[in-house]
Amino acid sequence: MSAADLTQLEFDQQHLWHPYTNVAKPGPTFVVKESEGVHITLDDGTRLIDAMSSWWCMMHGHKNPAITSAIHAQLDRLPHVMFGGLTHDPAIDLGRKLLDTTPDSLTRIFYCDSGSVSVEVAMKMAVQYQHAIGQPGRKAFATIRSGYHGDTWKAMSVCDPDTGMHHLFQGALSVQHFVSRPPIRIGEDWIDDPAQNGLAELRGALEANAGEIAGFILEPVVQGTGGMYFYHPEYLNHARAICDELGILLIFDEIATGFGRTGALFATDLCAIEPDIICLGKGLTGGHISFACTITNDRVATGVGNGNPGIFMHGPTYMANPLACAAAKASLDLLTAQDWRSKVSAIDEQMQAELAPARDLPNVADVRVLGAIGVIEMTHTVSADEAHARAHQMGVFLRPFGKNIYTMPPFITSPDQLSQITAGMLRLAREL
Ligand SMILES: *Cc1c(COP(=O)(O)O)cnc(C)c1O
């Protein structure tokens, strides 16, 4: 049969890769025709609540009118122009807005295409900075276990070595320094003893390898894909001090946590310190176009600039794409113009109440909620395909990862819709 004779779904299954799938055994896949608000509409007319915010991006809901009209207006004026030697209002206006909302010490913005690339940029900045200040031996990175930083090579090297499947790429991946994830959770009492709070291990690893470590990279407070784990922000305050002592840059990957998801505008705001470099992505355009950025402080930016060659060696073709900048500016305006804190805390409270019964189920290891992130951790790995099919029957789009049945609902989700999501999660926890 020639490709022309295939149905849309047959063509998809025979010719298109999907994320983390086996092309020889494609899982259940639905054709989406439209999306609006919290809903995605399939080709058979079924409407599903997008409990994933389409991989955690779509916090204002799908096809948000403020964002789509900003893109339309920009499309008619200047869809794209190279950023080398040229600039434009969308990039500048977004920059102003980002500086207003992100931690104060972060002043130099590098726009790029995706979260993984923003991590590459951050790591490259750290290495170039160390080189520039006379520490050329510092090329490696330290991180905590069960992290996730993206799928490109350098980003992958700091993902959890087990769930990131480092064994598959042995010899091809840069070797990095891993310490245990912070053992004290957010909400638990902080314990000052370094032997118990993870800081003795961190200090030991950083001191022993300081001569070769350029930066310490981690997701602040919430580890996403690597385990949906929420740890105590106090860990980061101490990590900052240890990094400063040893000349190691502190890099926060806020790609998943940024823009209100945890209940704070940025997870950094839960700490008393600020990182040297921050990575933003996912929710940056409210899920409407791929976009990301890396923001650093004056010290790192001027450090790199004073080095030899002084120029920062990165420049994506679509850097600062005006459509993406316009979308991001509209999304941030929308977020800051509303009382998003009350919305996220209402989602938080409702999920706490509605997911609590899962604690009594036989195969449930833990239930946790932080901001607009709700997780039922099972004792075993859950089949995403099975879950997908069953949630679909309940009108919800859920896609568990590993042992975690989780939701990151759009902030516009109504209480009734949220109940539908939590009921779907409880059902998966009972049945799978
Ligand atoms: C999703 C994610 C990335 C990768 O972003 P992409 O846009 O998929 O490249 C990196 N870090 C964290 C914490 C993420 O959640």
Image (tube, rainbow, N blue to C red):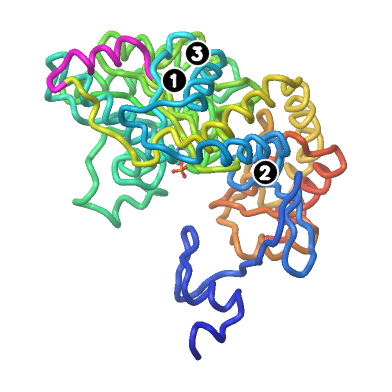
Residue ID at (72%, 52%): 35
Q: Which mark is residue 196?
A: 1
Residue ID at (62%, 20%): 264
Q: Which mark is residue 103?
A: 3
Tag 2: amino acid: Thr
Q: Spot the residue most to the right.
A: 416
Badge nearest the viewer, 3 or 2: 3
Q: For the residues marked 3 and 2, what is the alpha-carbon distance in whole angstroms? A: 27 Å
Secondary structure beneath label 3: loop
Residue 353 counted in the magenta span: no
Residues drawn in magenta: 296-309
Residue placed under numbered mark 2 in the picture? 407
Residue ID at (39%, 42%): 160
Tag 1: amino acid: Gln
Residue 306 counted in the magenta span: yes
Labels 2 and 1: the sequence-earlier one:
1
Q: For the residues marked 2 and 1, what is the alpha-carbon distance in whole angstroms? A: 31 Å
- Which one is in front, 240 or 259? 259
Looking at the image, residue 290 sits to the left or right of residue 83; the answer is right
Crowd tier of the residue under label 3, counting other residues whose Cα lies within 10 Å: few below 14, some 14–19, many 20 or above? some
Q: Quadrant of residue 75?
A: top right
Tag 3: amino acid: Pro
Badge nearest the viewer, 2 or 1: 2
Give residue 280's position: percent from left, percent from top.
48, 30
| Above/below status of 30 relative to 402 | below
Labels 1 and 3: the sequence-earlier one:
3
Whether label 2 touches label 1, CB < 8 Å: no
Labels 3 and 2: the sequence-earlier one:
3
